[in-house]
């Protein structure tokens, strides 16, 4: 518990000293202004809740990819990663906590986009089943944090990883069912999307906003399983990368 508390405090200090890391949460929700205006101009106000949830998930994913995934790279730049490798298991635990804590900061964006829709546009943005919607939103945070762990490993292992990082938004918005429903994607992409936690979480969140959720238990089980598998892959990748660095098989390049 001491490691968890220390990691959380450390990440809080880092964020306080670098408030620019939270810029994603201030910018991307503003996309909802465009989306809501489009709905009003085309008289599709019934889609307001779907649009609000889409803006929220986009913000959450982008924040995880561009901010939470930089935790390891920041440690490398600050020269603290080498020292952390003296206790790699403790570092992995601390890294997971810091990544989740950073990603969790995107959760209030859900309230932000709801307020924008209701307050500025007078749209009926309502979560009819908050008892399901809010836990699913937390699972979304966990899934995006585990994805950030995977990207963290790539930030060390792959040269030119920044280019890869910059490409991890719109393609995954598509695979997550944020731009088109997964059922409307071409067959190969639809198959891949069904194995991606974001598509399951987004569908669950939309259904929870509309009311009772069909097959809730089964869908939650699939979502949790996909997040768990992704988390294990991220931990294994990071363990392997950090082990290679520690043994001198991999150099911490710029």
Image (tube, rainbow, N blue to C red):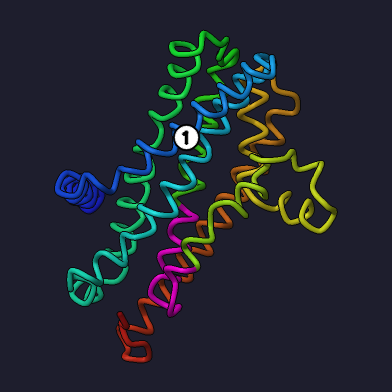
* Residue 1 in view: no
Residue for point 22% across, 50% down: 11
Residue 65: horizontal and vertical position, in percent? 44, 54
Residue 49: horizontal and vertical position, in percent? 60, 20
Residue 195 horizontal side relative to residue 154, left or right: right
Residue placed most toward the observer, 70 or 98: 70
Residue 77 horizontal side relative to residue 199, left or right: left
Residue 181: horizontal and vertical position, in percent? 74, 38
- Location of mark 1 (residue): 138
State the quadrant of the C terminus. bottom left
Residue placed most toward the observer, 182 or 93: 182
The stretch drawn in magenta includes residue 149: yes
Residue 206 horizontal side relative to residue 18, left or right: right
Residue for point 45% across, 13% down: 120
Q: Quadrant of residue 37?
A: top right
Q: Residue furthest right?
A: 187
Residue for point 58% across, 33% down: 54
Report the span colored magenta.
146-163
Residue 204: horizontal and vertical position, in percent? 65, 31
Q: Residue furthest front?
A: 41
Residue for point 44% across, 72% down: 161
Quick check: 204 above or below 8? Answer: above
Q: Secondary structure at mark 1?
A: helix
């Amino acid at each position: 518990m001491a490691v968890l508390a220390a990691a959380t405090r450390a990440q809080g200090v880092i964020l306080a000293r670098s408030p620019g890391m939270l810029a994603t949460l201030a910018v991307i929700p503003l996309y909802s202004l465009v989306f809501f205006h489009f709905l009003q101009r085309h008289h599709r106000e019934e889609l307001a809740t779907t649009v609000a949830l889409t803006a929220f998930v986009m913000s959450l994913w982008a924040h995880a990819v561009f901010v939470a995934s930089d935790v390891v790279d920041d440690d490398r730049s600050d020269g603290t990663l080498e020292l952390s490798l003296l206790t790699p298991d403790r570092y992995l635990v601390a890294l997971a906590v810091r990544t989740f804590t950073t990603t969790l900061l995107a959760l209030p964006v859900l309230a932000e986009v709801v307020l924008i829709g209701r307050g500025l546009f007078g749209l009926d943005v309502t979560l009819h089943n908050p008892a399901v919607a809010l836990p699913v939103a937390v699972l979304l945070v966990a899934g995006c944090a585990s994805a950030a762990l995977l990207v963290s490993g790539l930030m060390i292992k792959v040269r030119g990883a920044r280019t890869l990082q910059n490409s991890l938004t719109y393609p995954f918005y598509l695979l997550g069912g944020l731009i088109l429903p997964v059922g409307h994607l071409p067959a190969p992409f639809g198959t891949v999307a069904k194995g991606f936690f974001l598509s399951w979480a987004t569908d669950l969140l939309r259904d929870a906003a509309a009311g009772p959720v069909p097959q809730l238990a089964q869908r939650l089980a699939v979502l949790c399983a996909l997040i768990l598998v992704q988390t294990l892959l991220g931990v294994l990748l990071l363990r392997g990368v950090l082990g290679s660095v520690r043994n001198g098989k991999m150099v911490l390049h710029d």
